[in-house]
Amino acid sequence: MNLHEYQGKEILSTFGVNIQRGIVATTPDEAVEAAKKLNAETGTEWYVVKAQVHAGGRGKGGGVKLAKSLDEVREIAGNILGMQLVTPQTSKEGKTVHQVLIAEDVYYPGESETSEIYMSVLLDRQKGRNTIMYSTEGGMDIETVAEKTPELIFTEEIDPRTGLQGFQARKIAFNLGLSGKAFKEMVKFVTALYNAYDGIDASLFEINPVLKTSDDKILAVDSKVTLDDNGLFRHPDYAAMRDKREEDATEVEAGEAGLNFVKLDGNVGCMVNGAGLAMSTMDIIKMAGGNPANFLDVGGTADAARVEKAFRIILKDDNVKAILVNIFGGIVRCDRVAQGIVDAYKNIGDIGIPIIVRLQGTNAEEAKQIIDDSGLKVHSAIMLKEAADLVGELV
Ligand code: GDP
Ligand code: MN
């Protein structure tokens, strides 16, 4: 689950991570109130108005703007709220901005220069360890840095038995070229950041930029926080931060029905039990000349109600020209699934596009019989090759 910048920063700050302070607003009036409050708390007279959407690159898309007065805060917030923000990470249509974060300006002039640092914490799956990635080249596209100057990206692996150790935090501050107060602040920052990552069951933190201010403070100016869905049950307060407006509506509906669904842009809908089989089914559809319209794992209990729900979800997509049902009857009996498909078909009415059903495993023959006897426009197959060729023909 992804969080908004402001939510991520709120959580980080409860772990003692220094952040650029801000208050979220949904109207220009609220934005001005937020700015006044920030002024009272921090003394800042300049503010940054930041669109809150689940996508990076907001600055490039015009979703992050500096305001040098309360009037400018009102005007900029008015412009950004409700806009369709297009960034390098959104679709062409962009994302609707429902909220803005009014933040204190932290790039003020002072004794020394400000500098933007990149820092992320993530799980390196190959090594099976949490890793801190960091670079002096913050503020810009890290993919470009990785491509052009990979030597400027450092990584620090964390041993799960000891957690982040003091010498590692100091090494990071040293590699970032910091000294004096900024060095000490960075050691504290990294330590708190790693504690937060570990404490909230995150799967990704990306803080770009981490800012060294002109008075040598270290602050998180941005936050991208992804929580591990499997750990969410331990954090009901974070689970409540979910913003469904940022997610694909069909995926949300499928999730609520307990179906594992990911929308894709092909023309063959698929309904499969088991994630591994679902992935190989997608490959097979491609090999037969089609393109999968979705990934859908109906899970172990493919009963009539779930099958019907799954059909309804797949059919929401107008691009779907055929549906391939590929079920392996291991725990679940094929004849029950077949009956479920027939019942679901009858409940939905004329589906209007060809359905190819391939049932293999326990009671596969009986299942094929049920489909063939149903009189419905459903093609049945036992061998996958047969099913795939049918998909190819029909699409
Ligand atoms: P992103 O574009 O979605 O990654 O959003 P960020 O939160 O990273 O902000 C984008 C850019 O806005 C940063 O890299 C900074 O250059 C700029 N920015 C953010 N906060 C401030 C601020 O307090 N003052 C000024 N002058 N610029 C800021
Ligand atoms: Mn950023």
Image: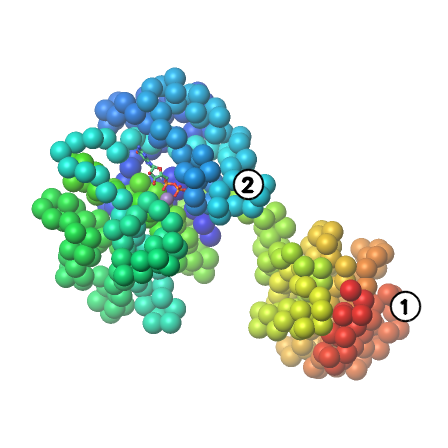
Q: Residue at x 29, y 50 (%)?
A: 137
Q: Residue beneath label 1, please?
A: 375
Q: Position of residue 90 (x, y in %)?
A: 52, 45
Where residue 6 sits, quadrant-wise, is: top left
In front of the other: 206 or 188: 206
Q: Position of residue 134 (x, y in %)?
A: 28, 55
Give the CA separation, mark 2 to mark 1: 45 Å
In what quadrant does ligand 2 lie? top left
Front label number (2 vs 1): 2
Q: Position of residue 173 (x, y in %)?
A: 17, 53
First of labels 2, 1 by sequence position: 2
Q: Residues within 10 Å of mark 2 (few under 14, many from 20)?
A: some
Query: CB atoms at circles 2 and 1 under 8 Å apart?
Result: no
In front of the other: 342 or 159: 159
Q: Is mark 1 within 8 Å of ligand 1?
A: no
* Residue furthest out toward the left: 180
In front of the other: 236 or 324: 324
Residue 216 horizontal side relative to residue 148, left or right: left
Where residue 362 sits, quadrant-wise, is: bottom right
Q: Is residue 107 above or below residue 332?
A: above
Q: Is mark 2 within 8 Å of ligand 1?
A: no
Q: Is residue 286 above or below residue 253?
A: below
